[in-house]
Image (cartoon, rainbow, N blue to C red):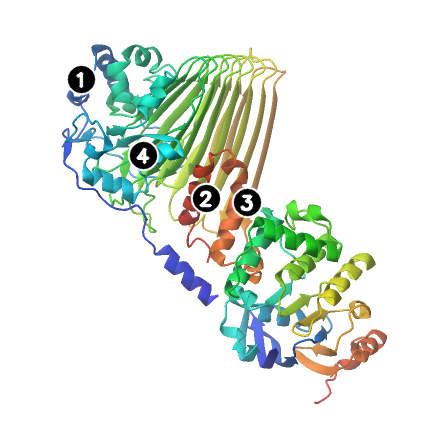
């Protein structure tokens, strides 16, 4: 589903990603871990097409398409979703209306009929029930005045409604109490499917107690320095990131 | 980034949608303003002597006045002697049906999307179309006449209902009110007149479409609406103008009078040519709009969506004389490219327990400068008066400006006045968030702007709200880069 080859990227002329290779197949859950400043969030942002991140080399294929030439909205419509580390507040814009606009843009791209307000509400109520999310959230402005936990839950809720092919969660677990973390994890687990993949960007192993990854990659100084199974996450939790400072070849 | 910049450039280079010129024979007076011109205008309109006298008093007062400079707007000097003060389409026979309207004029209306025909009846809108200065056709008069409602051009009202015009003309905006209103009083060419008799609720929205067409002809409309005891009316005014290089002056006056328990709702969507992206051309819009809540429990609501004009200078206000009367002002003003707007309201509380609400939303993009200027005045005798004001500014980009000048003048200690203000910016991060969800930059801006303006749009009649939203998105095209 996602093939990243020798990806180099940076912000304001400073190189942050120094040759990333990553391969994610449909149905898989991958975790990217790493210390602060290792380039985790930059990787998430470059995949989503954030205008501040400049690609300086390499290639990214998403379902066989060249992702790097697509603008952010085309990537989203092609099925790439990113749950933001810091979801943005949009005052005055109703959450439900925002999500309906997004969903219909994506459905149009996929050749599906747009949903009217009633059909949309049916879908949304179903997802809210599944994720145990309060309906009151719908009628509030997008993220405005939300607590940190509510914002993250809203990201998961949007993911559930938009049904992406590849979901990137950029430190969605950071700053969450255990109940909110469980809701996020439950959302991801409920959405795991043979034709969908997840990329979890996280600093801590905590989330991985609830969402079991197929592969864990450790990012340090803009490169993937270790890849392994879920046990790699436990090793990191135990030893910290210090033991990885000298990258091992291969 | 590069792809979005490209789209934005394409959008920005779109031409003003309504920029076309209609070729109709014009009957114009010579350039410039003299006492003779005032007399000529009055004579052409076959006005009674009292009205000519009123115009002349205004003209002589105007000569002693100077153009105001306190507005937060910058523009070159206006040469009042270069303006043609009156133009009317030459062929103007008495029309029995719309088929008799000049086909050229009808095509113009069609281009504007104004179906001036039976379709209007189905949609319940009577249109008094002011084409340049003279009325071309007035519809649904019969239906309104059954209820005793008078809705016609100002000139017709002068001919057919002189006693009403004489009783109310200048009672809200006197001929000596201010430089631009006084100029209008001297040279006004036409406009609309509506009179709703006692106890009648006007069953349809009254609407007028204004259009500046004749080259270098400033338009000086004058509108007067009177709602008698217990009457109610909703009036819509929508505007577009063709593309011009030279700046055109527009100085209109609107007067509203509401008697006991009467309600007047006046809604405007203003979309005159704003000038090009370098700030060349565009309409100078200097308007005086005021309503008088003369009777007890009367209510006047101004709702405006100002997206056009190079310069907007207008302060629709309410004089709350009757006890328990209510004044409301809901405004969205947008400035893009080099547009400048200095707009707001005046709420003058004279009666007891009078209430006013002000909701102003200013949007600035490009090099646009947007100023809110509002006065809340509570007179000594206005016991229990209340005002709530909310002024919000939204900035798009970092070249534009938002300014707020609230004036409070409180003479009664029982008054309660609240003022809230906020300034926010459409951030790159908000745009990116929307795009990551599949929403294009253009739609993201519209979404955010509509959310910002929601409280005002809610006040507009349905079909107008839709039009206003479209206009806003056209105005802001290419403002994010």
**Residue count near mark 1 (Cα–Cα under 10 Å), binned few <14, some 14–19, many ≥20:** few
Q: Is residue A84 visible?
A: no
Residue B247 horizontal/vertical position (percent)? 27, 40
**Residue count near mark 2 (Cα–Cα under 10 Å), binned few <14, some 14–19, many ≥20:** some
Whole-number angstrom distance, CA of label 3 to CA of label 2:
11 Å
Q: Helix, strand or loop at disc 1?
A: loop
Whole-number angstrom distance, CA of label 2 to CA of label 1:
42 Å
**Residue count near mark 3 (Cα–Cα under 10 Å), binned few <14, some 14–19, many ≥20:** some
Residue B477 vertical position relative to residue B419 in the rendered view, above or below: below
Whole-number angstrom distance, CA of label 4 to CA of label 2:
26 Å
Q: Which residue is mark 3?
A: B451
N-terminal-most mark, 4 or 1: 1
Q: What numbered label is drawn on residue B46?
A: 1
Q: Which residue is mark 2?
A: B469
N-terminal-most mark, 3 or 4: 4
Disc 3 with disc 4 on a shared chain: yes
N-terminal-most mark, 1 or 3: 1
CB atoms at circles 2 and 1 under 8 Å apart? no
The residue lying toward the viewer, choosing from B181 and A207, is: A207
Whole-number angstrom distance, CA of label 1 to CA of label 3:
50 Å
């Amino acid at each position: 589903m996602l093939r990243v080859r020798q990806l180099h990227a940076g912000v304001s002329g400073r190189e942050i990603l120094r040759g990333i290779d990553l391969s994610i197949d449909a149905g898989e859950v991958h975790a990217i871990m790493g210390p602060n400043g290792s380039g985790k969030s930059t990787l998430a942002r470059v995949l989503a097409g954030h205008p501040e991140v400049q690609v300086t080399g390499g290639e990214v294929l998403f379902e066989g398409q060249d992702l790097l030439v697509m603008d952010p909205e085309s990537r989203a419509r092609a099925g790439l979703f990113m749950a933001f580390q810091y979801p943005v507040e949009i005052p005055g814009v109703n959450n439900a209306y925002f999500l309906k606009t997004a969903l219909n843009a994506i459905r149009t791209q996929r050749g599906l009929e747009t949903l009217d307000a009633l059909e949309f509400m049916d879908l949304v109520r179903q997802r809210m029930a599944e994720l145990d999310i309060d309906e009151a959230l719908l009628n509030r402005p997008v993220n405005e005045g939300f607590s940190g936990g509510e914002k993250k839950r809203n990201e998961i809720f949007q993911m559930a409604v938009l049904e992406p092919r590849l979901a990137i969660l950029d430190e969605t677990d950071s700053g969450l109490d255990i109940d909110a973390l469980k809701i996020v994890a439950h959302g991801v687990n409920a959405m795991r499917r043979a034709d969908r993949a997840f990329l979890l960007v996280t600093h801590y192993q905590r989330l991985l107690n609830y969402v079991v990854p197929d592969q864990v990659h450790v990012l340090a100084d803009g490169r993937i320095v270790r890849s392994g199974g879920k046990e790699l996450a436990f090793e990191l939790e135990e030893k910290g990131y210090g033991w990885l400072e000298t990258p091992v070849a291969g | 980034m590069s792809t979005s910049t490209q789209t934005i450039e394409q959008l920005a280079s779109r031409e003003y949608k309504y920029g076309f010129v209609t070729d109709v024979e014009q009957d114009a007076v010579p350039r410039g303003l003299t006492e003779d011109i005032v007399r000529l205008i009055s004579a052409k309109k076959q006005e009674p002597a009292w009205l000519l006298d009123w115009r002349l008093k205004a003209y002589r007062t105007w000569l002693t006045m100077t153009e105001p400079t306190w507005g937060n707007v910058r523009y070159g000097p206006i040469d009042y002697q270069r303006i043609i003060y009156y133009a009317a389409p030459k062929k103007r026979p008495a029309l029995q049906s719309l088929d008799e309207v000049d086909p050229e004029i009808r095509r113009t209306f069609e281009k504007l999307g104004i179906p001036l025909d039976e379709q209007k009846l189905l949609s319940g809108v009577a249109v008094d179309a002011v084409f340049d200065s003279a009325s071309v056709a007035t519809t649904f008069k019969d239906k309104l006449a059954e209820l005793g409602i008078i809705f016609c051009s100002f000139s017709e009202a002068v001919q057919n209902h002189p006693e009403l015009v004489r009783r109310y003309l200048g009672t809200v905006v006197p001929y000596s009110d201010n430089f631009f209103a006084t100029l209008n009083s001297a040279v006004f060419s036409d406009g609309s007149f509506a009179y709703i008799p006692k106890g009648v609720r006007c069953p349809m929205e009254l609407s007028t479409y204004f259009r500046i067409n004749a080259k270098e002809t400033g338009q000086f409309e004058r509108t007067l609406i009177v709602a008698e005891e217990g009457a109610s009316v909703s009036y819509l005014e929508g505007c577009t103008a063709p593309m011009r290089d030279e700046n055109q002056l527009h100085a209109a006056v609107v007067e509203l009078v509401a008697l006991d328990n009467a309600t007047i709702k006046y809604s405007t969507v203003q979309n005159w040519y704003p000038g090009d992206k370098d700030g060349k051309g565009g309409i100078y819009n200097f308007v005086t709009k005021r309503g008088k809540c003369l009777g007890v429990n009367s209510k006047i609501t101004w709702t405006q969506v100002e997206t056009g004009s190079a310069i907007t200078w207008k302060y629709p206000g309410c004089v709350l004389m009757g006890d328990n009367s209510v004044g409301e002002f809901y405004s969205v003003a947008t400035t893009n490219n080099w547009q400048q707007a200095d707009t707001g309201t005046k709420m003058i509380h004279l009666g007891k327990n009078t209430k006013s609400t002000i909701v102003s939303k200013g949007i600035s993009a490009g090099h646009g400068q947007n100023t809110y200027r509002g006065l809340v005045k509570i007179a000594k005798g206005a016991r229990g008066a209340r005002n709530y004001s909310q002024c919000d500014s939204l900035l798009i980009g970092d070249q534009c400006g938002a300014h707020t000048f609230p004036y409070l003048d409180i003479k009664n200690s029982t008054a309660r006045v609240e003022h809230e203000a906020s300034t926010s910016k459409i951030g790159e991060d908000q745009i990116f968030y929307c795009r990551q969800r599949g929403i294009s930059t253009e739609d993201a801006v519209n979404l955010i702007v509509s959310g910002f303006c929601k409280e005002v749009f809610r006040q507009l009649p349905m079909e107008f709200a839709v039009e206003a939203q479209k206009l806003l998105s056209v105005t802001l095209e290419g403002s994010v880069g």
